[in-house]
Amino acid sequence: MKLSVIVPCYNEEECIKAFYAAYKKAFSDTDYKRELIFVNDGSTDGTLSLLKKIYLKSEESINIISFSRNFGKEAAMYAGLKAAKGEYICFIDADLQQRPELIVKMVSLLEKHREYDCIATYSRSSKTQDKLTALFKSSFYKIMGKMSGMDFVDGASDFRCFRRNMADAILSVSEYHRFTKGLFAWVGFNTRYVPYEVASREGGSSKWTIGQLFSYSFNGIMAFSNKPLRWPLYFGLPVSVFGFLYLIFYLIFALSMNRDFSPIAVLLALLIFFSGAILTSIGILGEYVGKIHTQVKNRPIYIASEVYKTEDKAENTEIIEFQLEYEAQKEQRIKKKKEKFKEKRRKEKIKEEIELQKQQLEAAQLEEEKKRKKQQKKAKKSNEAEQEPVTVPEDEGYSAGPEAEFEDEE
Ligand code: UDP
Ligand code: MG
């Protein structure tokens, strides 16, 4: 089996038919063996009946897992993953917000690039979401990344296609409170993120309310970070030290000044000290609870992506040789690309320099031209001035002028 497509469905009677039609159309040009796994997550509408009809009518491989009640999308994805037999596995929603055609592209990307174990999508636009939800989601990914120390891509969705090795790794994590996006980040491997446009729902409405999103986020943080358990320690310890120092300073001050002890001041210092001490103890307890929490989740201690045993050397030789050859080719391709890029940059730089010199030359020529014209104008003016005859007006020059008249009056 080449591909397993897992579709969690909860009250999706308005979308199932359209989804199946789109799925069939998307794969019409491909001939690889595939299976479709519908997980009915305790729907209360006609979803299950519709799924059964498709199951009966269809000639292709279709599986239905129907839950006894609503266990949530995370449980549905886990059930689908457990049943999947494909070499590649894909999660997709039933509401057609994620287009099945993209699965074909993701599979071909995985086939072309052996270095990727998973092709995950992140939503490019949030047109279908209100601003508050979009803000809530992006803040959540930031907080989650900081608290867990793992990489969480903003807008990353469960719509992804991955190899069997990654599916096995996810299945080996059998904790009850699942947060699949976190698990994908936790198990490691090489994931490539591609953007996708979130379409509007085929029918029905989103199953998430702000309250549910909040609880989902809270679960995610709880499952991947023990940091909140340390907060009382971080807060309590300095408070306790402050209370202690306050008490000591107050006693030294009162004794050296020969003053009576104020019971209120002493009580306040003791109160601060003990409040801090209680918080510190809770923090220390939290450290232990955190360790128990990690142990109880029973996650594997490590996940190996490749293992080569001596006894399998004969079988592995061909694979390893192929991989090494592939790596060498890839390196060479990257090197060539880098050289090409460098050469392009060099040529661009030369072009820029030539352009700059051209501009400078033009500016200099313009300046020169301006100067020349100025000089010509000056020369013309002085020439004209030399040729002009000096004429003295008849009634001017030798008359006494107004000053003289004034003097005369005096
Ligand atoms: N879903 C599910 N169980 C639930 C809630 C949702 O299996 O309890 C399925 C739902 O049928 C859909 C997918 O999970 O196929 C995504 O749900 P939804 O569209 O409500 O989420 P959104 O796209 O708004 O994030
Ligand atoms: Mg949806």
Image: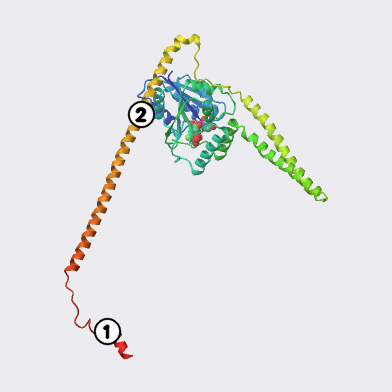
Judge from the rendering whether residue 84 lies leftward or rightward of residue 242; answer left or right: left
Which residue shows up at 78% across the image and 48% down it? 253
Position of residue 100 measured from the top left corner of the image (x, y, whole percent): 41, 29
Q: Is residue 153 visible?
A: yes
Which residue shows up at 26% across the image and 53% down it? 367
Q: Residue furthest bottom?
A: 409
Please state which of residues 9 and 185 is positioned toward the viewer in this rendering: 185
Q: Earlier in the sequence, mark 2 or mark 1?
A: 2
Which residue shows up at 45% across the image and 9% down it? 314
Q: Is residue 12 visible?
A: no
For residue 56, above or below residue 127: above
Instruction: Please name the amino acid that badge 2 sits on.
Output: Lys
Number of numbered discs visible in the structure rendering: 2
**Looking at the rendering, which quadrant does residue 333 occupy?**
top left
Judge from the rendering whether residue 30 lies leftward or rightward of residue 67; answer left or right: left
Q: Which residue is mark 1?
A: 401
Q: Residues within 10 Å of mark 2 (few under 14, many from 20)?
A: few
Position of residue 88 measured from the top left corner of the image (x, y, whole percent): 45, 22
In 3D space, how far apart are the residues under numbered discs 2 and 1 (Cα atoms)? 92 Å
Under circle 2, the secondary element is: helix
Instruction: Please name the amino acid that badge 1 sits on.
Output: Gly
Q: Which residue is mark 2?
A: 337
Position of residue 395 measured from the top left corner of the image (x, y, whole percent): 21, 83
Please state which of residues 97 and 395 is positioned toward the viewer in this rendering: 395
